[in-house]
Amino acid sequence: MPELLPFAVSLKGTENAVRDGLAQAMACLAPLHLNTDDAGTVELVLAEALNNVVEHALASTPELTAIEIRGSHGADGLHITVIDCGAPMPDGTAPLAKTPNLDVETHDMPEGGFGWYLIHTLATDVKYSRVGAANHLSLQLPVGV
């Protein structure tokens, strides 16, 4: 199994910074030599998580708050934690993986609501906790095993 040293990437809590932070995190995964599908899965899940942080948790303070991505790899796959000091999740829990209703006319298709569904579907473990003033979203992805 390839060895990946634990890593951390820090980025501003803005939409523009998400792209660069995502690229930095993906570059940290290079030692795993992920195939295209696994790399795409990681990138999609991480992009959805980061976009949710910017859009919801940091909506009122994006320039003042950083997001940290921490990653490590083990026999059970990739472990990623996304940390921010934005608003906590409603009810102190991550949203459930509700399947979006696609049984509608094309013009009535939802524009959003797929993020948490994708995250829960592609990650084997999704945990949220509030630690002091920080949100911790922990994800486990079965890649590089």
Image (tube, rainbow, N blue to C red):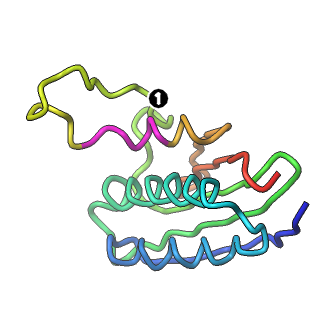
Residue 60, x across and y down, in percent: 27, 63
Q: Which residue is mark 1?
A: 96
Determine if the magenta segment contains residue 117: yes
Determine if the magenta segment contains residue 136: no
| Front-most of residues 68 and 117 | 117
Q: Is residue 18 left or right of residue 28?
A: left
| Front-most of residues 16 and 26 | 26
Q: Quadrant of the N terminus?
A: bottom right
Where is residue 102, by image quadrant?
top left
Tell me: residue 54, above or below residue 101.
below
Residue 58, x across and y down, in percent: 35, 61
Number of callouts? 1
Magenta stretch? 112-118
Q: Residue at x 46, y 79 (%)?
A: 20
Tell me: residue 119, above or below residue 105.
below
Query: Amino acid type of disc 1?
Result: Leu
Residue 137, x across and y down, in percent: 58, 50
Residue 115, x across and y down, in percent: 40, 44
Where is residue 35, by image quadrant?
bottom right
Where is residue 5, by image quadrant?
bottom right
Label 1 secondary element: loop
| Front-most of residues 78 and 85 | 78
Q: Residue at x 42, y 74 (%)?
A: 19
Q: Is residue 3 left or right of residue 20?
A: right
Q: Residue at x 77, y 62 (%)?
A: 72
Q: Is residue 122 left or right of residue 59?
A: right
Q: Residue at x 56, y 61 (%)?
A: 83
Tell me: residue 79, above or below residue 24.
above
Residue at the extreme top of the image, as rendered: 103
